[in-house]
Image (cartoon, rainbow, N blue to C red):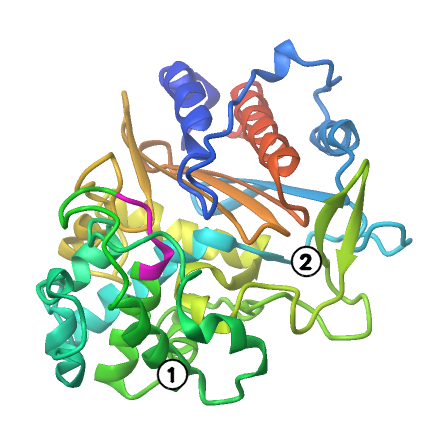
Amino acid sequence: MITPQTFNHVFRHLSIVIAFTAIFSCNSENKISSASIVESNITTTTDLQTSIEAIRKHHNLPALAAMILVDGEIIENIAAGQRAWGTSEKVTINDRWHLGSLTKAMTATLTARIVERGDINWDTTIVDVFPDMKANIREEYKTVRLEDLLTHVSGLPRDPEHIPSLSTSRENYQAIDKQRRQWTAELLVLSPKTERGTYFYSNNGYIIAGAMLEEVTRMTWEELMTLEVFIPLGMNDSGFGPPGSPGIIDQPWGHQQVGNGWLALETGSGADLPSPMGPAALIHTTLADYAKYATMHLRGAIGEGDFLSQESIAKLHTPVTNNYAMGWGVGTSDVGITLQHGGTNLLWFSEVLLVPGLHLALVTFTNAGGDVAAKATSDTLKLLTKFFDTSDTSN
């Protein structure tokens, strides 16, 4: 059993890791500074619920959720605030939260499952899967491998802002795999942002990786994620896009900051990034479901579990360049690696820190986007670290 005394051994490393987490998000080029909670005027207590509510109120967020997971057991899970700004509908610990770029590690995990099935390899190139595109795509992309796409070294630009299909994506009712295939064709004629092998964070790479999985399996990325990740892990309350039902506030809504308040965006079309971006940023989940997923990665990193082979786990967790692996920023501590990432679709924000050597996961979600949300989740991770440091998890 991991105790607070063991945690003290790496506490000083985690404070550095948490400050680093926000770099690896859907908004990763805007590096958010992470001032210490003790330097702010947020009043925290030994009661986690009260302290999470204090952070939420300090940053004037609609809602904020947090979780501490140790040895596969949820030690604390907290949800505070409103599902939609200006309403009386309160969030619960069972609500669903949009993950943004925490989706990337899930797409990489799915890819490992498909590789183990033998349908594709890490070294499979784009033109291996799409030979019909070979004559039209740029020469620089013809040798780009699946692994390159998932580790942000493909050379592709960051976002799909310059492709023709983006402007019509809200009105496109074609099958989602056909849309992703078309986006792939259009992305591969864009000028590279960097040389292949140089780190440059790219949502486009994950879109194309998802399209490659669809092409070789004849199933959509959404179907594959459900069958290969959600169902085997028992993630029964996870899905795609903004959570909830149109017209009713049965789940949290995403929010855009307007002045000193927030504009709640009703679940439905326009409340998220375009659907073809799914493999990069469009999964939603609950605290409990994310705990199951995090536990699988924590156990796999220390040689336990059989969801993936040790070879696949090592592939997912080993950085290629810029301390980035497949959907994870990788750090080090006295008890081994740390895995971290942030995510946002500009209407939600999420952050996670995994410390396999301590069997520990710290997770926080908010239904708001922008710099305020990024600062709030950073403050929350620090709070969770301090709370774990002063709690007796051995009882």
Q: Decide which of 291, 38 is in the foreground and name it.
A: 38
Residue 75 in the magenta stretch? The answer is no
Compared with 33, 41 (above or below) is: above
The residue tagged with tag 2: helix, strand or loop?
loop
Kindly give the residue lying farthest to the top in the view shown: 39
Q: Is residue 5 visible?
A: yes
Mark 2 highlights which residue? 94
* Coordinates of residue 76 in the picture (x, y in percent): 61, 39
Image quarter hosting the N terminus:
top left
Residue beneath the point at 26% across and 40% down: 324
Amino acid under disc 1: Asp
Q: Decide which of 64, 371 is in the foreground and name it.
A: 371
Task: Point out the stretch of residues depicted in magenta.
Answer: 200-204
Amino acid under disc 2: Asn
Q: Which mark is residue 31?
A: none
Compared with 26, 361 (above or below) is: above
Q: Earlier in the sequence, mark 2 or mark 1?
A: 2
Few, some or many C-alpha atoms within 10 Å of disc 1 (few <14, some 14-19, many ≥20)? many
Left or right of residue 276, residue 330 in this image: left
* Coordinates of residue 41 in the picture (x, y in percent): 73, 14
The residue tagged with tag 1: helix, strand or loop?
helix
Residue 203 in the magenta stretch? The answer is yes
Residue beneath the point at 71% across and 52% down: 255
Residue beneath the point at 68% across and 58% down: 94
Magenta stretch prevailing secondary structure: loop
Compared with 34, 191 (above or below) is: below
Mark 1 highlights which residue? 177
Residue beneath the point at 73% across and 74% down: 245
Left or right of residue 387, residue 275 in this image: left
Q: CA distance from mark 2 to mark 1?
A: 31 Å
